[in-house]
Structure formats: structure tokens, C-alpha cells
Image (cartoon, rainbow, N blue to C red):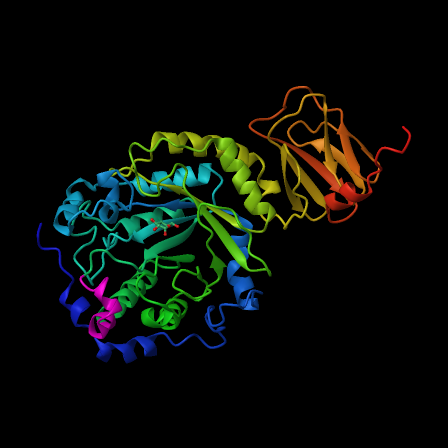
Amino acid sequence: MSDFSIDRRGLLVGAAAAPVLVAAVTPPAGAQPPPGRDPSAAASTPDQQRRMKWWHDAKFGMFIHFGLYAAHGRHEWSMENEAIPVAEYQKFTDRFNPAPGTPRRWAQLAKAAGMKYMVLTSKHHEGFCNWDTKLTNYNSVNYGPRRDVIKEFVEAARAEGLRVGFYYSLMDWHHPDGARCETDPVARRRFVDYTHGLIRELMTNYGKIDVLWYDVSWPLDAQGWESEKMNQIVFGLQPDIIVNNRNRLAGDFSTPEQTIKAETGGRAWESCMTLNDSWGYQKADDNWKDPRTVIRNLLTCARDGGNYLLNIGPQPDGGIPPESVRILTAAGEWVRRHGDTIYGADICQPHTSQYAAFTRKGSTLYMHVYFWPAGGDVAISGLKQKVLSAKILKTGTALQVSQDGFRTHITGLPETAPDSPLTTLVIECDGVPEQDTLNVRINKPRLKVGI
Ligand code: GLC
């Protein structure tokens, strides 16, 4: 058990290997330069649009944090935040033992939840590799399940028709050079070669990979990580892949974490979020989001042109926490029935309501009512377009609409919500719907003097 070491090659690969790497990653003729050269460049290039089309349409993905921390059951940061000695932490390998077939169950749940892609931690900050790497023996083939978890994951996702992504943490709490690379040039050389080598394996050995999701770049900057070269390796091996921005380059998309915040200037973004308060399995964390919150978050992302990457943290046997299954199954039942209002949705400017969320496709506005008001009516303030028709999506019931230039008043609704946990109204407009509540505030006639 004490023999956790970096393979000799991992330590010895040095500058001599660098030209080989460069030669092997010459981009195919006609390929666009990899993204990230100009972090301020927001508008997407034709090559990005081509690579990202499926991802923009997909809107909803599953994040999976699965590593030795699952065996500890106290959050994926426990190694650092409880200052656990390496030798003690390594013992979690004994209890890290996903049953065969568990990735397939993750994929089945993702599909049932209406998710279109999955991103699994290949290596988190703890440094343990979930695949058959030749660069360190600290991996899932030598320890724990003694199988290639990444391989099973890729096969499972593909079998369920889902796109495949790898999360990869640059920061490493286990590798001997993981911290000293900041101050020791020889250690940096070794560690960058190790890092690029691991990424190269992931990009080489598992067929077509759709997303590479870098994380925490401490302690180096883009120059130190040789991030340009890193992306060149990736794009040289996977010309259709998309990469995020956490290797200190702009990449293809931004990664707001635990918050939903749209990017400006047409830049792509994906909000990643936990279902409770932990990414990795934390047994006692019971701060779960309910299905309605999950759906509202997804709708907010879709409205603002982003994606929603929602996390599960499987138990050490690979089982999904029952609460996660319950929430995602319930949310997914609704999401799949409302797929037309989410997948491929256009950015939707109307957003103001105290009881409804909006999404849009073309000139159709979807009003997703999450607090069903009493009184048989709902209203939208400041909708500038003429409404041609409105109906309840679930029942097809046609609704009455009146508009006075400020209020769009929709009547004829039942007293109780016809659907759960949200009821969607389909509102056909005579153009792309836009909302101007400031006009309402300023110009809606006020009380007349003397009345
Ligand atoms: C943070 C955390 C990490 C988690 C990630 C997901 O960077 O360090 O534990 O994997 O966010 O976005």
C-alpha cells in the first residue's frame, strides 16, 4: 500500500520529449487555431460554432464527481481541508470500489433526467486517476476497483446516446511536484510533462471525446502550464472537442460555479452546480435542492443562452445517493415532457415575473408558471409583441388574451395548476417576444389629478 509512486517515465520525461509532443499534435490541414489565444475575444468563431452546435442545443448535462473522496464521504476537499496525510488518504483506495455497471446507471439516470451529456472527474485535486494511465500507478486499475473507470464511463454514456466529457484537475495534492512546480523549474518541467501526458492519454485512448473540463490551475499560470500547447495537444487529437476556460485560457466556454450568470458578447457559458452542497459524496449533506428548483435553474440557463451542468456525487460503491435519484427522476419527468421548450431554445429577453420563468423558440414564448396564482389569470408586463394565441401546453386548452399596450392579460386558466411542478403556457407572438418593464413604469397612466 505504501508503493504509490509516479512511474519512472512520469518523473524522467523531460525536455527531450517535448519536440515529439509538438510534432504529434500538428493540427489537421484547415483546422482553426485552438481557442484561447485572445481571452478577450467573446464572439464565437465559425469553428467554435461548428464544434459547439450540439452543446448549445443540449442545454443540460450531468457532472459526476467520483474519486477516493467518495470512500471518505466528507466532500472532495477533505484531503486538504482536514489536512489528511497522503499515506492515510491513500488507504481510501481499499473502500473505493464501484460495482461493475455503475457508470451505466449514472448514464441511465442522466438520460431519465433529460440530460444530453456527462462529464466525469478523471482526476480530481486528490491526484488519483480513474483510468489505466501509464504515467502513475496511483490509478483505478492498480487500486480500488482495479478497472478502468473512464473506459466504463465512456462506454456507458455512448450506450445511452449521451455525449462524453472528462473533468481534469490541474492542481494535484498527491504528485510530488504538485506544489513545488511553482518555484522549482525542474519540478515544473516534470509536472507539466506529466500533466500534458495524462491529458494526451485521455484524448488518445477512449475514442471521440466531446468535452474537456479543466479545473483549478493553482499554482501555475497559463505560461507555466503551457496551456497553449496543452490545448494544441487536445485539438490535435480531438478536432471536434470543446474545452472550458480553467486552464487560464479563454477556451470555448466560461464556467460560472454554483451561480447562474450569463456571459456577455455572445460568449458561451455553462453554469455548474451541486444538487446539495458537495460535489463529491458527503454522506451527511442533506441540503438538497428540490425538483422545482432544478427545473427553474435549467430554464434560467436556457433563457439566457447557457447550459446547466448538474452534479451527482456517487457513493464509494458507485451507487447514486437515493435523494439524487429521486430529485433528478422527478425533474427529468417534467424536463423530458417539455423538451421542445428547452433543447435548442433561443435566448429569451422576457424575464420579469414573480411566478413564472420564460424560454423562447423563434416567436413562441413559453411561460413556465412555478407558483400557480389563484384567480384564473396570469399577466405579463410590458410585452411588446401582439399575442396571436395562448394555450396550456399540457392540456391544449386555449386561453383568452387581452393586451392594452402595457399588460398582456391571459385568462381562462383553471383554479388549480394543471401540471406539476410547473405549468407551461405556449404564447405565440407576432415577432420575437421582448419585454419593456421600464416603459410600463414610466408610461402606464397614473392616477389622474382630482380622482
Ligand atoms: C471547484 C472545486 C471542485 C469542483 C469544481 C467544480 O473548483 O475545487 O471541488 O470540482 O469546483 O466546478
Q: Which span of residues is magenta-colored?
A: 176-189
Q: Is residue 154 visible to us here?
A: no
Would you say 162 lies left or right of 388 here?
left
Q: Nearer the viewer, residue 449 or 38?
A: 449
Horizontal side, residue 86 vs residue 320: left or right? left
Q: Image height check: is 17 above or below 277?
A: below
The correct choice, above or below, for 386 with respect to 137 in the image is above
- Image quarter where the C terminus lies is top right
Does residue 444 appear left or right of residue 421 in this picture?
right
Residue 65 position, x and y percent, is 33, 45
Q: Residue furthest top?
A: 415
Q: Residue drawn at (35%, 43%), measured in percent from left and top?
A: 279
Query: Is 426 above or below relative to 35?
Result: above
Query: Residue 347 lies in magenta, yes or no?
Result: no
Q: What residue sits 46% from the left and 68% below the top?
A: 36
* Residue 450 image point, x, y percent: 91, 30
Q: Can you give x and y, in whole percent of width and height, for residue 175 in the image?
A: 20, 60
Q: Nearer the viewer, residue 417 or 111?
A: 417
Magenta stretch holds residue 178? yes
Q: Residue 333, position in %: x, y?
A: 51, 32
Residue 138: in sight, yes or no?
yes
- Occupied quadrant, residue 193: bottom left
- State the residue at coordinates (54%, 53%): 56
